[in-house]
Image (cartoon, rainbow, N blue to C red):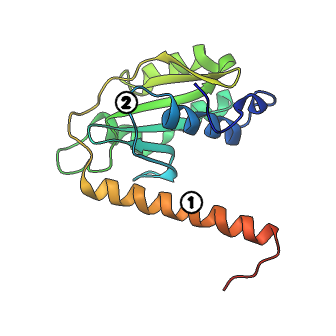
Amino acid sequence: MRYPVNISSLKKELTAGKMKAIILHYFRFQYSKMCYYIATEAGGYNADVFLLNDDESIEIEIKISKTDLRNDNKKQKHIKYKNHSTNEYSQHPNKFYFAVPFALVDEARIISEEINPKYGILCIHDGRVNIAKTAKKMHKDKPSNMTKKVIAKRMASELINLRLEHYDRQGVMFL
């Protein structure tokens, strides 16, 4: 299967930005369940990657160091995801993943079990996404229309910003 991007160039010097690009590519072109909405810095808690289709939503937090991974434990969203109430989780994902480089997979397993045993782990290695631990559903509700609108707006903002950056590099003035 041919993809529009050569992700092999992202293999060297794995950064959070490169990991995000690899994850976006995977969920848009390779994930078995088509995701119609894919955005970054989105959702109720500003997820690194938030994606959804008609049946489920998935939040992904990218962690590039042990410290970064350990500090996530302090975020309030994890308490809410674990102990959600029925009127509170319109933007709470059905599934949650930590995405980590290969070297952090074992640490991520330990920390994800401490935070929420339902969390999954994505291993980013050699320019590919591997599921090191499959996430379990935290709730069975389908994504709300409000969540779809929030993600669609974020997707539009990302596209607009990319276009503005492109034209800015070419010296075209806006506003």
Residue 133 position (above or below residue 155):
above
Secondary structure under the numbered disc 1 in the rendered image: helix
Instruction: Name the mark nearer the viewer: 2 or 1.
Output: 2
Image quadrant where one finds the N terminus? top right
Q: Can residue 73 be seen from the camera position used here?
A: no
Q: Residue furthest left?
A: 86
- Judging depth in this view, the residue of 66 and 11 nearest the camera is 11
In screen coordinates, is 62 left or right of 77? right
Q: Which residue is mark 2?
A: 33
Residue 54 position (above or below residue 32):
below
Name which residue type carries label 2.
Lys
Residue 119 position (above or below residue 80):
above
Residue at point 50% right, 38% down? Answer: 28
Residue 158's disc number: 1
Task: Report how far apart the C-alphas of labels 2 and 1 lie in the structure.
Answer: 23 Å
Image quadrant where one finds the C terminus? bottom right
Name which residue type carries label 1.
Glu
Residue at point 33% right, 23% down? Answer: 136
Residue at point 81% right, 67% down? Answer: 169
Q: Can residue 129 be seen from the camera position used here?
A: yes
Q: Residue furthest front?
A: 2
Query: Which comes before the other along the chain, label 2 or label 1?
Result: 2
Q: Position of residue 82 (x, y in %)?
A: 31, 33
- Judging depth in this view, the residue of 161 and 114 nearest the camera is 161
